[in-house]
Image: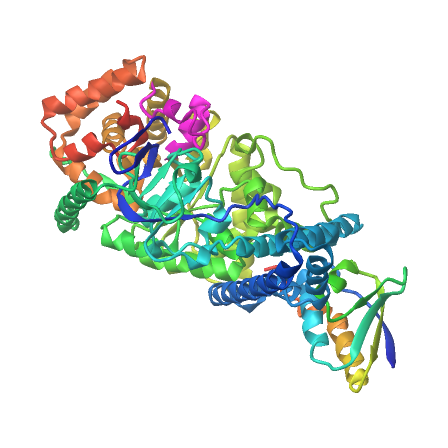
Amino acid sequence: MTANRATRSGLVLRGLGVSPGIGLGPAVPLPWRGRLVFRRPLAPQEIEAEVARFHTAVRIAREQLQGLRQRMEQALGREHAYILDAQRLMLEDAGILGEIETLIRTSAINAEWAVKLVTDRILAIYAEIKDDYLRERGSDIEDVAHRLLTVLAGDRASCAFPEGAVLVGETLPPSLLGELDPRRVAGLVIGTGGWTSHAAILARGLGIPAVSGIHGALAFIEDQAPLLVDGTQGLVFVHPAPEVIQRYQEQQKERERRWYLLRERAPLPTMTRDGVPITVRANIERLSELEDVRHFGACGIGLLRTEFLFLQAAPELPSEEVQQQAYRQVAEAAGPEGAVIRTVDWDENQMAALGSLRALRDEHLATTGMGDREPWIPERNPALGLRAIRFSLSRPQVLRTQLRAIARAAAFGNLRIVLPLITSLEEVQEVRRLLDAVCQELRAEGVEVPDRIPLGVMIETPAAVWLAEELATVADFLSLGTNDLIQYLLAVDRDNDRVAPLYDPFHPAVLRAVNHVLRAAERAGLALEVCGEMAAHPLHALVLLGLGARVLSMRPRAIPLIRDLIRHCELAPLRDLAQRALTASRGAEVRHLLLRGLEEMRLEVFDEALLNGSAPLLRDA
Amino acid sequence: MQRRTVQVTNRLGLHARAAAKLVHVANRFQSTIALTRCDNGQTVDAKSILGVLLLAASAGTYLDVIASGEDEVEAVEAICRVIESKFGEEEGATS
């Protein structure tokens, strides 16, 4: 939050617009994991009411678990839903419930404190268990205790948000994202997290307006306060005045009208005014976005993020069958241009947050016969740790399952595989060997598998930039992942809003790296696709085109705007502009150069996007 | 009273899912059912998920299943069967 000022009607909070659009609705706090519990002594006449309150909370928690279980069962099948049974049984366990009730009565204390005392005692016993595997089961108790405390505090469960609510919270954990129903959420206000945090990417994918970087959001916004979220400019109006609402509603109407016009022209081929064809693909991270791919006229899928499968399966791992069905759906929906599937891009910290670490260890134990004996310690620097391809290669069984599923689905369409966070040739070759083995194995099982499934490399580390030419010899295609590349080039944690302003796609180092990779791909005669937020931003996209990119992949909703932009620009002057940008020594210079160049080119079609800025760097420009 | 000794043979022991299955089965019977670890004598109620979990019976542990009540014969039989069948989870554990 950079500034806040009281207005006649209330407060305007300024943060980082991380998902464009306008959302209006009552504030609803997100459940918070680290709950504080206080001890409150009871008067004798209060005890019965407290016991009753406790039993009501148990009943509600049980109903919530039942509902969650049904949803999991529908989505994933019976076997996976079984894990919640242990938690539900705990809420039916006469031993635990009786102990808590007795404690409320004999010690005359509030239910929260009694729940805490009893669960702490149980957790202490758990900590003594010798078997690593069984000891970790203590987290089920923690989960149940947290649920009970949440209900006791009178908070809504995440699955029971009122329709049209604006969710407000310090962070939005991935485990919670899985529970959200996008159609019911009007907007998001998040305390921490940048433009490319998982919450922001997901919000954009779902079309939910979101503002991040409002530290201590809950301190400024009371429960149920009417909020207007402007995810384009990064503003949150608390108790907005009627004229503010009216102004925004008019803007919204105008935007929808333009949107409609842009979409009308969708089926036309995407060519620059001087006749150069540009391929525009979609990045997706949920199967529900497949409809958008068709709707916005994407030319295939340039990036399928597969983390959602792990999110949905948590705390188990997604089975080969579940993955195969998902990839098959993607293959069939993608059309002749096909889809690029990225192997899972997660680190162990994130897997732990999902509760999937245990399943990961089980799988390892079941396949290798070796348990991880040492306790798991969170990584201090996950961005530089065991993530993405390193994670996959360290858990070959997980990677094998994913490759098998993709290979099986490849019979139903044109599928390619891309590997995230590659820093060496060996990593690519190792996956290639594994992929070949998997394909052979499947053929031996009588499964139809294409002769060759193209294997690509994400260029998203400085190492990969400088090795691009060599990587091109072991890969079938290159994919430029600008989000991570910028993060690693500029040493900026993109999810840390304190340094988010340093995350600048116009930084000369970024442009020169992109240029280097494009030239390397050209020399190797390989296709290079640019996916990442840069491709979805009008100004950045123009620079990419000027530097020579011919395939851009972006979130589906950004496609109409970018396509319209491509149709209105000429490539020759853009090339000149890009060449001049490469000699600039500051990001501000590049931006200035570009804005002036566009004026000369009389590119007016996307003025609105330029003025409002759909990326943070434009806000303060 | 009925009593039988059974060995936990599934690889992961009495973990949450297995324990939940065992408690489900136990709850079908009228009889009181106790589980005792043969190595240390720790005894728990087979109808309490927490009890079963805190038993921390890993693979290889021997358990005494003790039931008393009208349906004690069937109860011991059913509990032993679910443990011996490795809670139906061993095959297809990896995919």
Q: Taking B14 as reference, is A152 left or right?
A: left
Count of residue discs: 0
Looking at the rendered image, the quarter that the C terminus of chain A falls into is top left
Q: Taking A265 as reference, is A400 left or right?
A: right
Q: Give the range drawn in magenta.
A: A480-507
Q: From what the image shows, is residue A336 above or below residue B79?
A: above
**Residue placed at 13% from the left, 51% from the top?**
A264
Seen as rendered, the residue at the extreme bottom is B70
Residue A272: horizontal and vertical position, in percent?
15, 35
**Residue placed at 28% from the left, 17% from the top?**
A588
Residue A582: horizontal and vertical position, in percent?
29, 17
Query: Can the viewer see residue A316?
Result: no
Query: Can the viewer see residue A602?
Result: yes
Image color mode: rainbow
Looking at the rendered image, the quarter that the N terminus of chain A falls into is top left
Q: From what the image shows, is residue A298 above or below residue A584?
A: below
Taking the magenta stretch, the answer to whether it contains residue A497 is: yes
Residue A488: horizontal and vertical position, in percent?
46, 26
Between A293 and A572, the one lying in front of the other is: A293
**Residue placed at 32% from the left, 54% from the top?**
A164
Residue A200, located in which quarter of the rendered image? Answer: top left
Residue B27, located in which quarter of the rendered image? Answer: bottom right
Q: From what the image shows, is residue A499 above or below residue A529?
A: above
Taking the magenta stretch, the answer to whether it contains residue A12 is: no
Residue A614, located in which quarter of the rendered image? Answer: top left
Between A245 and A484, the one lying in front of the other is: A245
Q: Taking A447 as reference, is A53 left or right?
A: right
Residue A501: horizontal and vertical position, in percent?
37, 24
